Amino acid sequence: MRSQSPLFRSACGLASAPLLAAGLLADATLSPATAAPDAQPAPTITVDAAKTGAPMAPEIYSQFIEHLGRCIYGGIWAEMLEDRKFYFPVTADYHPYRKLEDTPYPVVGASPWQIIGAPDTVAMSADKPFVGKHSPVVQPGSGIRQLDLGLTEGNEYPGYIWLKSAGPGTATVEISLVWGEGDTARQRLRIEEIGGEYAKREFRFKAGATTDKASIEIRVSGAPVAVGTASLMPADNVEGMRADSLALLKDLQAPIYRWPGGNFVSGYDWRDGIGDRDRRPPRTNPAWTGVEHNDFGMHEFIRFCRILQTEPWITVNTGFGDAHSAADQLQYCNGPADSLWGGRRASNGSAAPFAVRYWGIGNEMWGKWQLGHMQLEHYVIKQNWVVDKMREVDPNIICIASGDMGNGWSAGLLKGCSDHMHFIAEHFYCQEKPDLAEHMRQIPDRIRQKAEFHRKARTEIPQLNGKDIRIAMTEWNYWYGPHAFGELGTRYFMKDALGIAAGLHEFARQSDIVGSAFYAQTVNVIGAIKASRRNAALETTGLVLKLYRKQFGRIPATTVTTGSIDAQAMWSDDRKKLTIAVTNPALTPVEVPLAVGGAKLKGTGTRWEIACDDPMAFNDPDASPDKIRITESALTAPTGKLALKPCSVTLFSFDVE
């Protein structure tokens, strides 16, 4: 028998899983999952509804986004053009992709702009560039194009381009959206009267076909033209964000979003992400690959959170950054308009402070892969220094330290920084297991391991006396498999849904010590949502997060199971519903005997189910309808048994007398 409640905890020891957050995991070869061994005892569920644990924090359903792969650019942000600010020089050697070249979403490692015409007709000029180090100058009779754009027939695509004349004569620019061969498979627009200073010229196209192989062409005639920057987005974008991704993000109802990293933050200068978006400097991504456009910066993140009606969490750079920069960043967000950095915020369009409450102090500074990594005893000094300077600006912020239980780091921070944190972060990722039940159990086992470590720390570390520093599980997920959606864009399968559901059960069991959790990384990059060039869909794991957020309940009741299933009972806040959530890792249907004490169930209720007898089934954004969905049906009078489909996640919500 395995105890699975806040009041009946297992004390088994668990081996530490590899620290995959280092970004060192190689692509794994996927293998079909197998059913649980026959030696498992028969499954049963026993609930004592009168015995309850601490309410599970809604913040368990929070999310994490990082400037990595296609999470923001290509996932949340609607910009269709790569390297729109010409960070890479446009050259005759057109070889844009330097990683994942043979996949649908390769990584740009050189200019994605191809010269149309003779190789010497486009040159990069460093003389008063529009943005960054240089801007392309295109000679008459030549041009540049970008390939591999995704269009949907009938949809409109507005855009703009900054242009100036770069020589004598009258310059004309023709911009074309191309979706096939021949003159009938393109739309042309002419821009005339181009002056000697950069000016923004807008355009709008309507696609004549559906394709992921469209292109945009910029051709020059009459006189040379300097191109400052360009943009192209779907017309349904919401303040620059993808409408399809936003709709799914709203379904998740995440209470907090953590940003901008992740490893990215340790080399990020937040000042690069404010001001005129077109004039923000392009950079290389400091932690991962590709170009960081700085299009999605502070103001865009705050608008993202406001649109989703969620709380922003900003992580400050304690890698290459320092305490003064963090304090300035806080003042930019929360300071009054008459303060130095609050005034900058106001001049950038936001007179009212952002009132950001949650501040992460660094990311994984315990890892040798982290920019600015240092020894624990040095980082304790930096953690306290950064928080002290930030509290001088706003003493009411909630600070989260970046811990790791596996190497003494969490214990060191708790001993040296307990007066400089409200929560301590932990991360974990799990790989693939061939046995379906073992694959599922990894997630709850890791959560329990973290909780037991911190519960024990409270009894052994004197500095924690009288303090309630809870865990913020700021990254948790599976991480394995090919990068099907760009860098770290791994798919998730039905078998992964089982583990995420069981993880939510475990968060309920550990509700006294885990204060929040952040699924990593929301869109494309090991994410609950996958977005192609034209469409977006919830992964199996996203379906679980959506369902549990709305239907799981908040107050854990003592739940004991046997067999390979994982189950947890939860009361609603008003105690009118008792929901029993169950995962079945078997490849056969199961009827599970149910015994409930401490509550009298009515003969009414609702059943929600996510199921597929193929554990490797997945949803694809370009395939409709979704293969895996949430189904809902009415419950009849309880019979003492719960019917579970093979490889399923099922919630039984019973009305209670």
Image (cartoon, grey):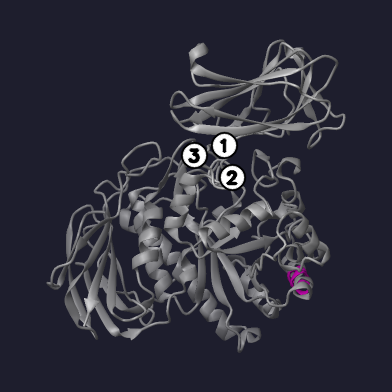
Q: Give the image location of residue 414, x and y in percent.
A: 65, 77
Which structural element holds mark 2? loop
Q: Which mark is residue 240?
A: 2
Please report whichever mark, 2 or 3, sits nearer to the chain's N-terminal start. 2
| Residue 382 in which image quadrant | bottom right
Residue at screen point 39% across, 41% down: 30
Residue 386 within the segment the image draws in magenta = yes
Instruction: Judge depth for marks 2 and 3 and give the one in front.
Output: 2
Label 3 is placed on what type of residue? Phe
- Quarter of the image with the C terminus is bottom left
Q: Is residue 475 above or below residue 386?
A: above
Residue of label 3: 485
Magenta region, mostly helix, strand or loop? helix
Local crowd size for mark 3, using a 10 Å CA cut-off: few (<14), some (14–19), many (≥20): many
Please report whichever mark, 1 or 2, sits nearer to the chain's N-terminal start. 1
Q: Are marks 1 and 2 in contact (CB under 8 Å)?
A: yes
| Residue 131 in which image quadrant | top right
Q: Which residues are magenta?
A: 380-388
Residue of label 1: 233
Q: CA distance from mark 1 to mark 2?
A: 8 Å
Q: Is residue 81 visible in this depiction of the protein?
A: no
Residue that lies at the very extreme toward the front in this rendered image: 193
